[in-house]
Image (cartoon, rainbow, N blue to C red):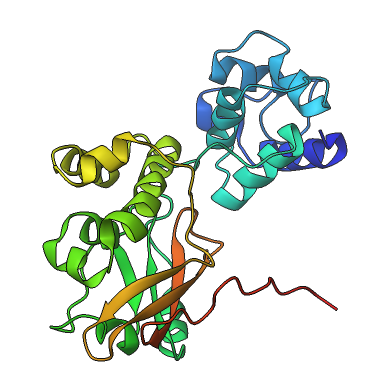
Amino acid sequence: MNKKALRALLRERRALIAPESHGFTRPTGQGRRAPGLSQHQVDQLLHRTLGTYHRLESGSYPNPPSELLRDVARLFGLNEQEWVLLCRYALLQDPPGPLYSSSGKAIPGVWQEAVDGIRHIAYVSDASWDLLAGNEAFEELFPDRCPPQNTMRWMLLDPHARHMLTEWATSWAPLLLPQLRAALAARPDDDTLRQIEKEVLTDPEAAPIYEAGGSVIHPDGDERPLLHARLGPGWATMCAAQPLTTPGSRLMILVFHPGARRAHPRRPALQAG
C-alpha cells in the first residue's frame, strides 16, 4: 500500500464533494470547516461501519475489499484512470474490472486519423470488440471491403471468417475463445459479450473449444495463417496495444506477409539498449 499517495488522492477528491449535494447541512457555528464531505458522512453514504473510511484514507486498512474501493470511487466520481490509481495505491495491483459499465466503449476521435496513418492493417475495437476505427488496409482484407461491426463475433461465428482465418479450428479459435472468457470475467454485465457467448455455446464447432478453456488473454506477437482477399494466403503477425483512456479497448496492427512460409518465426523480443 502506498499510504501517502492514497491519502492525497482520497482527500483531494473528497474535498470536492459538497455535503449539501447529499442532503447534509454544513455546521454554522464553531466546528469543522474543512471542505467537502467528512469521513463520517462518507461512511453514512456508503452504509459502512463508522470509522471504515477513516481506516482507508489513513492507510490503516490492509487489503481493503475491492467492493469498498469501487463504492468510494463511484461516490467520489473518479474516472477510469483515477480508479486504476486508487487500486494501485490501496492494493498494489490493477483493478479487477472497469469502474463503470459504459467505460471502454468510445475513443477520442483523433484515433481514426492515427489509424489511417498506419501502413499495415490496423483497427481499433472497444471492450466488447465492436469496431471503432479502421484503415484502408483493414478494409482491403475483406472481399467486399466491408469490415464486420463486431470483430470477435465475426472471427468466432461467421462462416466467411472461418474460411479467411486459415486453420480456424487450430490456429485461431483456441486463442480467441479464452479472450472472450477473460473479457466476461472483467465485464460480466456486458450485454454484447454475453450475447456472443450465448451464440458460441450453441455453435457445434465453437462450443467444444470454448468449454475446453485456455489461458490466452491477448494476441500480441502471435503469427497466424490468414487468407487476404486481395493478396491471397499468407501470415499475419499481430501487434496489440490499448488506448489508455478506454479500458478494455484494443488497437490491432496486423503485419501481413503473403506466402506459405512464416515471416516472423520466434523473432526475439526488442529490448532497450
Is 136 displayed left or right of 47 in the figure?
left
Can residue 134 be seen in this snapshot?
yes
Nearer to us in this view, 260 or 163:
260
Is 78 displayed left or right of 235 in the figure?
right
Name the quadrant containing residue 70: top right
Can you say which quadrant of the picture contains the N terminus?
top right
Compared to 107, does 248 lie above or below?
above
Q: Position of residue 36 (x, y in %)?
A: 68, 34
- Residue at position x 53%, y 35% from top? 74
Nearer to us in this view, 97 or 167:
167
- Residue at position x 47%, y 84% from top? 114
Q: Residue furthest front?
A: 261
Compared to 7, does 231 lie above or below?
below
- Residue at position x 36%, y 34% from top? 188
Q: Position of residue 197 (x, y in %)?
A: 24, 41
Q: Position of residue 96 (x, y in %)?
A: 55, 36
Can you say which quadrant of the picture contains the C terminus?
bottom right
Q: Position of residue 135 (x, y in %)?
A: 35, 84
Nearer to us in this view, 235 or 26:
235
Is 28 displayed left or right of 71 in the figure?
right
Compared to 29, does 184 lie above or below?
below
